[in-house]
C-alpha cells in the first residue's frame, strides 16, 4: 500500500478548489482545437443529467467547394448541417456516461473529419457513510471501510485523513469497488487515540465523512478460540469446557442447545480458561459455541467457534405405553398379544437394546414368573387360561426403565363398556371419537383406551391406540389414519390396571363412492333365488360400506327394476329373493354405498327358473338312482335282492343255456383247418365247405335297435336285459324287418348276443317255451361260446380282437336265410361277431 504524506496547506487547497468547482465558479466552456477547425461547448466537459448543451463547429479558412456542407454528429447520427463555414446545435443530456460529438464536412466525393469533443454525464460524490476500522487478532493491521453511496459514473477519488494529536496522514484509496471503499492502515499505537475522515471528489463536486475517533483496543477483534468438551463418567448430564486465550486477559461467553431446538442457552462473563455445564439431556447431540474479546466493556467479540458432540446414555426414565389383546386358543389355552410404543428420546436416554416381557400367573398353584426377551415392539404367546400380571421394560446400555404393568382378566363381563360411542369424519386424515361413561360399576375408572385398526388389514394387525385420563370423553385420532379408509374403532374403560369390555364402531376421515361393485353369485332355490356376494377390495371401497342395493328386472321389460336395500349392519353376505316366475328371464345387478354415495354395478347375472315339475322329476330320478346304487353296493342287500328276483321272475329265466359245443356243427368244425377270426361283417352269404346238418328251429330274438344301443354300455359284464311287453311273463322278441331278397349288408352284432346259446335240437325240450336265455343272475355260462372240447392251445389261429363298446355297423332289416338258421352256418369269435356261412 502506498502512503502519501501531504502537507496540510496542499490538502486545504485541494478542498477549496473542489468546493469552488461545485459552486459553479468555473464558467469557461469546453473546447477542442483541431487542424481543420475547432469544436466548442458552452459547458464544461462533465455535466449532470438534464443539462442542455450548445455545440458549435467552426472551419478554418480553406478552399472548399460550395457544394460541400458542414455537419455535427452525435454517436454517428447527424444532428445539424450547413453550407457555410460554421454550424451549431443544441443537445439535452438524458443519460449517464460519455457522449461523443464530431464535426464533419460532407462533399460529393465523401466525408472528412474536422474535429470532435466528449461530454461526460455523472453525479457528484455522496458523503461517505458507516466508516469503521477493525483489526483481526492482536498482531494484525487495521482495515478501514466505508459506504460510498450512489454511483457517480465518472472518475471519483477517495482520500483517508488519519490523525492523532501530533500527526496527520492522507492516504489514497486503491479499491476499485464502486459501492464500498476500503483501505489498510499501518500498525497503530495501542495507547493513542486516532481520528479518521474520508474525502471524496470528482469534476462535479466533493464530500467528506463524519470523523471516526477510536483507540486500538476498540477495533481489535480476537480470533475464534479453540476449545474442547469432556463429559463426566459418573453423570451423563455434566460436562467441562476448556479453551486457550489469545491474550493474557480475555473475557468469554458461551451458548449451547440441542440440535433439535432453535433457542440458545447463554452463559456470560466467563473468566479464565475453563467452565462446567450441568443438567444436559442424556444421549442428545449438543452444539456449543464460544466467543471472546480483550476488554470486558470495550472492543469487538470474536466470531463463534463451534463444537458438536453427543452426551452419554443414561438409565431410561419413561414407562412404556402397553396394550394387549386376549384370544381363545382352545379349551384350556389363550393367546395373549402385547403391543407397546417405543419410548421418546428424552425417555429412552439412549439406544434401546431389547425389551423384557414378564408373565406372572395370579393363580397360586402356578409356578413363578416367566421372562422373555424381544427386540420388537410386540410379543405374543399362547398361555394357560388363567389371569396374569404382565410387566414390560425397556433396556439400554445403562439399565432398565420402570416396568409397565397390566393385568389380564378372564372375567371382564362385570366391567361394562363405554356407551354411545360415535365416530365423526373430520377430513385431513383425522376422526373425532366421542363416548359416554359406562353404566355404574363397583370398580372405579382410571382412564380410557381408544384403539383403531384398518378393517381390511391382516388377521392380526398391529393396532394404534391412545390412552386418555378418565376426565376425557372425546379425542381426535390422526396417527396412522388415511383418507378413504374404513377403520374399526373400539373404546375401552380402564378399571385400575384392567380393561373392560369394548364398545366398537366403524369410522373414516373422508369417503367417496365405491369405485367398483360387489362380486355377486346366484343359485336357484325353490321358487326363488339365493344371492350371495363377496366384499369389495379395500382399495375400491373408499370408505366404510353403509349398505347394498340389489336390482331385479325382467329382461326387455320397460318397467322400473325392483330394488332390495340391505343395511351393512344386517347384511350377512346373502339374500333370498322369492316369488320369481318359472321360465321368466331376469337381470340381476348389485351395488355398494358409502356415506358419499352409491358406486357402480359389479357383475350382472341373467337367471331363469325351471318348471317345478321338471325339476322334481330330475331330483326324484337322481334320488332313486343313488339309493339303488347304495343298496346294491352292500353284499346282504344284493343277496336279498337276488332271492326276491328268483321268486318274482318266471322259471324259464333260471334254466341253463344248452352248450353249443355239443352241436353237430361244432364237432365238424374242429376237423377243418380254417381261419377262426372273421372280419367285422355280420350275416354275409358265402359258400360253405361243411356238410350241412339237419336244420334246427331257432326263434328270431333280435332286439329293436333302440334297445340294443341302450344296452351296449353294459356289455362285458355278462348281463343282457330283454325287453318285456307290459303284462307278459314271457319274453317278447321282435323280428328284424326283412329287406329285398338278395340284398347284402355288413353288420356288427350287438354285445348282448355274446350271452346267447343255441339249443342243439329243439325236439329234446318238452316245454313250448324255447330255452335260449338263462337267468342273468344265476347263469354260470362263460362270457364266450366254447368251441368244442379243445383249449386255446389247440386253436393257435384264433385271434381275439378288442371288444367294441359301441356298435358301429348298421342293422339292416334283411336276414338272408329267412326264418331258419343252422348253427353250423354261424361262426362266432371273441370279437362278438357272427358270420352266416
Image (cartoon, rainbow, N blue to C red):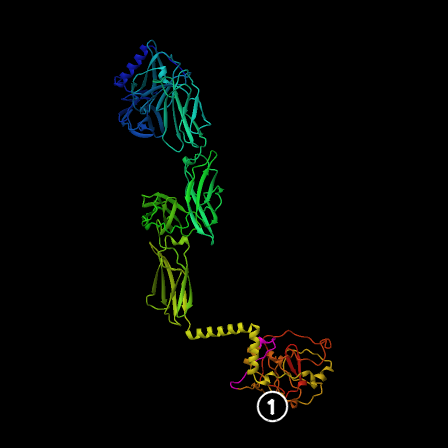
- What number of labels is visible? 1
Pointer 1: what residue? Answer: 768
Viewer-closest of 226 and 191:
226
Viewer-closest of 475 and 314:
314
Quarter of the image with the C terminus in it: bottom right
For the stretch drawn in magenta, what is the main secondary structure?
loop
Q: Left or right: where does residue 607 sit relative to residue 119?
A: right
Residue 445 within the segment the image draws in magenta = no
Residue placed at 30% from the left, 12% from the top? 12
Viewer-closest of 342 and 102:
342
Residue placed at 37% from the left, 32% from the top? 262
Asked if residue 70 shows in the view, the reply is no
Residue 471 position in % (x across, y down): 31, 43
Asked if residue 765 shows in the view, the reply is yes
Residue 802 position in % (x across, y down): 64, 73
Residue 88 position in % (x across, y down): 27, 25
Q: Left or right: where does residue 125 sit relative to residue 1?
A: left
Q: Residue furthest front?
A: 365
Quarter of the view holding residue 559: bottom left
Q: Is residue 316 above or below residue 137?
A: below
How crowded is the residue under tag 1: few (<14 C-alpha within 10 Å), some, or many (20+)?
few
Quarter of the image with the N terminus in it: top left
Residue 487 position in % (x across, y down): 38, 50
Where are the magenta residues, as a range?
712-727
Residue 719 within the segment the image draws in magenta = yes
Viewer-closest of 322 and 144:
322
Mark 1, secondary structure of its residue: loop
Amino acid at each position: 500500500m502506498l502512503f502519501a504524506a501531504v502537507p496540510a496547506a496542499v490538502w486545504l487547497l485541494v478542498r477549496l478548489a473542489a468546493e469552488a468547482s461545485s459552486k459553479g465558479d468555473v464558467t469557461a466552456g469546453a473546447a477542442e482545437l483541431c487542424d481543420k477547425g475547432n469544436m466548442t461547448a458552452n459547458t464544461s466537459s462533465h455535466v449532470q443529467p438534464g443539462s442542455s448543451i450548445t455545440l458549435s463547429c467552426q472551419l478554418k479558412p480553406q478552399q472548399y467547394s460550395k457544394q460541400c456542407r458542414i455537419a455535427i454528429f452525435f454517436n454517428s447520427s447527424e444532428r445539424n448541417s450547413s453550407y457555410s463555414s460554421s454550424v451549431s446545435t443544441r443537445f439535452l443530456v438524458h443519460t449517464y456516461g460519455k457522449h461523443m460529438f464530431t464535426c464533419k464536412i460532407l462533399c460529393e466525393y465523401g466525408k472528412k473529419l474536422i474535429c470532435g469533443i466528449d461530454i461526460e454525464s455523472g453525479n457528484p460524490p455522496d458523503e461517505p457513510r458507516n466508516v469503521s476500522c477493525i483489526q483481526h487478532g492482536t498482531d494484525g493491521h487495521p482495515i478501514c471501510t466505508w459506504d460510498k453511496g450512489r454511483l457517480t459514473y465518472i472518475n471519483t477519488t477517495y482520500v483517508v485523513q488519519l490523525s492523532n494529536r501530533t500527526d496527520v496522514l492522507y492516504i489514497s484509496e486503491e479499491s476499485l469497488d464502486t459501492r464500498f471503499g476500503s483501505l489498510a492502515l499501518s500498525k497503530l499505537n495501542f495507547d493513542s487515540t486516532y481520528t479518521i475522515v474520508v474525502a471524496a471528489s470528482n469534476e462535479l463536486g466533493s464530500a467528506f465523512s463524519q470523523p471516526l475517533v477510536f483507540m486500538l483496543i476498540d477495533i481489535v477483534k480476537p480470533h475464534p478460540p479453540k476449545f474442547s468438551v469432556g463429559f463426566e463418567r459418573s453423570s451423563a448430564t455434566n460436562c467441562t469446557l476448556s479453551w486457550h486465550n489469545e491474550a493474557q486477559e480475555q473475557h468469554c461467553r458461551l451458548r449451547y442447545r440441542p440440535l433439535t431446538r432453535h433457542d440458545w442457552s447463554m452463559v456470560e462473563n466467563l473468566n479464565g480458561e475453563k467452565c462446567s455445564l450441568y443438567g444436559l439431556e442424556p444421549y442428545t447431540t449438543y452444539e456449543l459455541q464460544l466467543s471472546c474479546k480483550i476488554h470486558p466493556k470495550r472492543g469487538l467479540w470474536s466470531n463463534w467457534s463451534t463444537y458438536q458432540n453427543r452426551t452419554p446414555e443414561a438409565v431410561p426414565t419413561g414407562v412404556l405405553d402397553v396394550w394387549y389383546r386376549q384370544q381363545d386358543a382352545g379349551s384350556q389355552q389363550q393367546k395373549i398379544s402385547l403391543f407397546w410404543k417405543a419410548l421418546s428420546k428424552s425417555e429412552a436416554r439412549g439406544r434401546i437394546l431389547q425389551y423384557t416381557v414378564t408373565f406372572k400367573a395370579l393363580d397360586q398353584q402356578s409356578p413363578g414368573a416367566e421372562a422373555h426377551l424381544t427386540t420388537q415392539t410386540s410379543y405374543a404367546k399362547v398361555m394357560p387360561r388363567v389371569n396374569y400380571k404382565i410387566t414390560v421394560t425397556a433396556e439400554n446400555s445403562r439399565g432398565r426403565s420402570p416396568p409397565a404393568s397390566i393385568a389380564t382378566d378372564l372375567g371382564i363381563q362385570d366391567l361394562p363398556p363405554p356407551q354411545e360411542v360415535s365416530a365423526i369424519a373430520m377430513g385431513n386424515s383425522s376422526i373425532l371419537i366421542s363416548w359416554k361413561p359406562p353404566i355404574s360399576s363397583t370398580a372405579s375408572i382410571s382412564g380410557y383406551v381408544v384403539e383403531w385398526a384398518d378393517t381390511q388389514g391382516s388377521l392380526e394387525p398391529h393396532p394404534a391406540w391412545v390412552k386418555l385420563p378418565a376426565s376425557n370423553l372425546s379425542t381426535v385420532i390422526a396417527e396412522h389414519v388415511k383418507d378413504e379408509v374404513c377403520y374399526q374403532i373400539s373404546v375401552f374403560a380402564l378399571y385400575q390396571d384392567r380393561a373392560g369390555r369394548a364398545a366398537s364402531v366403524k369410522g373414516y376421515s373422508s369417503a367417496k363412492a365405491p369405485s367398483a361393485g360387489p362380486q355377486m353369485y346366484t343359485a336357484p332355490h325353490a321358487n326363488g333365488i339365493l344371492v350371495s356376494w363377496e366384499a369389495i377390495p379395500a382399495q375400491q371401497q373408499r370408505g366404510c360400506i353403509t349398505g347394498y342395493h340389489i336390482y331385479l328386472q325382467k329382461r326387455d321389460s320397460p318397467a322400473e327394476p325392483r330394488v332390495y336395500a340391505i343395511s351393512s349392519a344386517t347384511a350377512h353376505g346373502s339374500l333370498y329373493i322369492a316369488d320369481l316366475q318359472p321360465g321368466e328371464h331376469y337381470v340381476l345387478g348389485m351395488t355398494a354405498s358409502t356415506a358419499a354415495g352409491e358406486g357402480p354395478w359389479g357383475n350382472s347375472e341373467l337367471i331363469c327358473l325351471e318348471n317345478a315339475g321338471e325339476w322334481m322329476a330330475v331330483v326324484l330320478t337322481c334320488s332313486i338312482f343313488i339309493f339303488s346304487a347304495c343298496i346294491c353296493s352292500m353284499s346282504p342287500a344284493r343277496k336279498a335282492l337276488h332271492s326276491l328276483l328268483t321268486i318274482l321272475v318266471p322259471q324259464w329265466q333260471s334254466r341253463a343255456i344248452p352248450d353249443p359245443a355239443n352241436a353237430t356243427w361244432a364237432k365238424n368244425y374242429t376237423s377243418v383247418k380254417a381261419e377262426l377270426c372273421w372280419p367285422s361283417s355280420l350275416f354275409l352269404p358265402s359258400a360253405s365247405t361243411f356238410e350241412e346238418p339237419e336244420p334246427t328251429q331257432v326263434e328270431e330274438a333280435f332286439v329293436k335297435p333302440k334297445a340294443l344301443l341302450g344296452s351296449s354300455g353294459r356289455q362285458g359284464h355278462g348281463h343282457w336285459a330283454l325287453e318285456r311287453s307290459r303284462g307278459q311273463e314271457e319274453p317278447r322278441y321282435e323280428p328284424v324287418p326283412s329287406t329285398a331278397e338278395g340284398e347284402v349288408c355288413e353288420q356288427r352284432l350287438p354285445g348282448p348276443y355274446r350271452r346267447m346259446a343255441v339249443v342243439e335240437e329243439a325236439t329234446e325240450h318238452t316245454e313250448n317255451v324255447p330255452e335260449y336265455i338263462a337267468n342273468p343272475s344265476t347263469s354260470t355260462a362263460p362270457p364266450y361260446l366254447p368251441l368244442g372240447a379243445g383249449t386255446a392251445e389247440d386253436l393257435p389261429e384264433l385271434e381275439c380282437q378288442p371288444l367294441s363298446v359301441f356298435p358301429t355297423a348298421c342293422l339292416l332289416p334283411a336276414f338272408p336265410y329267412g326264418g331258419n338258421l343252422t348253427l353250423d352256418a354261424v361262426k362266432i369269435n371273441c370279437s362278438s361277431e357272427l358270420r352266416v356261412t
